[in-house]
Amino acid sequence: MGRLFWKLFLFILLAQLTTAMGVGLVFSLRHKAEREALKMHPNDAAVIALASKVLAEEGEPGLRRKLQEWQSMPLPRVFAVDGEGKEILQRKLPAGAGLVKQSVNLKDGRHWQLLLEPPPPPPGMERIPPSPGHIPLPALFGALFGSLLFAALLAQYLSKPIRLMSEAFQSVAEGNMDVNLSGKIGRRRDELADLGREFDRVALRLKLLIEGRQRLLHDVSHELRSPLARISAAVDLAQQQPEKMDDWLARIQRESERMDVLVGEILAVARLDAAAGQRQLQSIPLAEWLDELLSDAAFEAESHGGTVELVNHGPDTLHCEPELLARAVENVLRNAIRHGGAGGRILFVVDQDNGGVRFTVADRGPGVPEAELESIFQPFFRSAHAQATGGYGLGLALARRIVEAHGGVIRAANRVGGGLEVVIELTA
């Protein structure tokens, strides 16, 4: 058992024992007060004082007459005992009599003791239990055992999920992301169970990120190996064929430029991940942002013999990080220009969508196999029919990360009649 278990156990046990002692004290004081109420009577002092006065002024005969009169009245019985222990009316003294006592010395030197019999209990209080004689040890030990058991169960119930979370954290720290903490906690429905489920989500997210990093490193090393091998081969051929030095140098330059583009895209992805959660969004005029974006896209489309047509039904302003979002949309447009076919017409539609903005880029190229529609947003993925168009498969992957950083979604679908349609949706 951990330290938290024993702390919870002792605190709960102490609270239960304190509560039991407090309840016992309250009942004990109440019992004592009720018994005292039975012993006291509002006429006690007056009755015995009157009897003492009669005895002092009228002597034994006067007191005898007065006590005989009181016997027919609803008053506490007063007993008068002389110095020899004889009661004035020859009555038997009740056991326990004398709760109120009064001593009287007469002028003739005789000494009398006046005793007051306890009054009958008031209505409704006849069944007050007697004062307890001894502590019931079996009941006391039974209550103590029940408190210990309850405190142990409650402490175990509270400390178990926390102990499991500590073990899960240690497992994640050691690199094991398959913790399944919610399964170990069980069917609990409380804040600790919710925390366990959130921890599983975080662990799964970390696992996917780590696996993604590993795949990225593998893909980067694979992509860099090919141009490096070609550069090495070009250097060897240049040494063997000095007369073709210009050709080999041109080849080395092309491969170096391809590596530079690849490294630039990889760094862009890395910077995007590093700056996650630190975005500084701003409101910009949508029309001006689109004009600047489409000027570059139209120029590139013309070089491929195509056109880009804008249909803008969007809002007046756009809330985003302008340069970053422009890069995402530009990558989608460039992908459509490259794969839209010679002389293709690229349709770029901007709409309002539930307070947000939706960008749609549609071409009339060959499209993408249905099984690859999700994969085209993965780093270094290139469809089999697109191998000859160049690129490293990072453009759409970078676009997806930028859109998700803005709280939006990006998806692709094949168009009816041929072509691909990529939709970017940003919330308000």
Image (tube, rainbow, N blue to C red):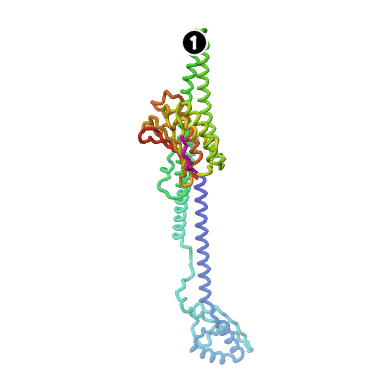
Q: Position of residue 349 (x, y in %)?
A: 45, 39
Q: Magenta span covers which residues?
A: 309-314
At horizontal 36% and vertical 32% (from top left) the residue drawn is 418
Residue 249 in view:
yes
Q: Name the residue under label 1.
A: 237
| Residue 409 or residue 379, whichever sits in front | 409
Residue 204 in view:
no
| Residue 180 or residue 323, whichever sits in front | 323
Q: Position of residue 265 (x, y in %)?
A: 51, 28
Say what secondary structure mark 1 lies in. Answer: helix
- Magenta: main secondary structure equals strand
**Is 62 rendered above or below residue 183?**
below
Q: Where is residue 142 in the image (x, y as percent from the top left)?
A: 44, 57
Residue type at tag 1? Leu
Q: Does the magenta stretch include residue 287?
A: no
Q: Where is residue 326 in the image (x, y as percent from the top left)?
A: 52, 35
At horizontal 38% and vertical 35% (from top left) the residue drawn is 415
Q: Quarter of the image holding residue 112?
A: bottom right
At horizontal 53% and vertical 18% (from top left) the residue drawn is 253
